[in-house]
Image (cartoon, helix red, strand yellow):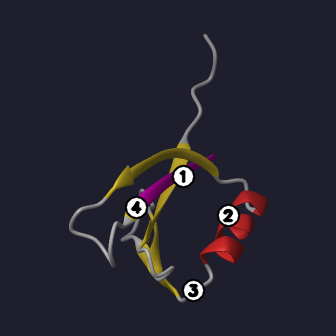
Amino acid sequence: MAERTSWQYCQVEVGADGMGVLRQFFTDREPVETALHNNWPSMLAKLGQQGWELVSVFPNEGGRGRNPLTYVFKRPL
């Protein structure tokens, strides 16, 4: 039987103003949050360099700014 891959997840919630928050989730501790200050494009590039893969994007009605989006990423542990 093939070995099952374990994943680590993070999400980025970004408003129309480019401001947002990055949340990284762990199995053994609380999530870590990092504020994003108008650096969403550079953060996206950094996530790619770190092996994160985009798996979902959805609107977040109660989120930051006007028409906010939440991006969900995963990478193998």
Q: Give me the C-alpha separation between circle 1 and circle 4.
A: 13 Å
Q: Is residue 67 left or right of residue 35?
A: left
Asked if residue 52 can be seen in this view, the reply is: yes
Q: Earlier in the sequence, mark 3 or mark 4?
A: 3
- The picture places residue 48, in percent across and down from the top left corner, at 73, 58
Decide: is 20 above or below 28. below
Q: Is residue 36 left or right of residue 31?
A: right
Amino acid type assigned to the residue bearing label 1 in the image? Phe
Question: Majority secondary structure of the magenta segment?
Answer: strand
Label 2–label 1 contact, CB within 8 A: yes
> Foreground mark, 2 or 4?
4
The residue at which mark 2 appears reads as 47
Q: Give me the C-alpha separation between circle 2 and circle 4.
A: 17 Å
The residue at which mark 4 appears reads as 69
Q: Give me the C-alpha separation between circle 2 and circle 1.
A: 9 Å
Residue farthest along the left direction in this orientation = 62
Asked if the stretch drawn in magenta spans residue 11, the answer is no
Alpha-carbon neighbours of circle 3 within 10 Å: few (<14), some, or many (≥20)? some
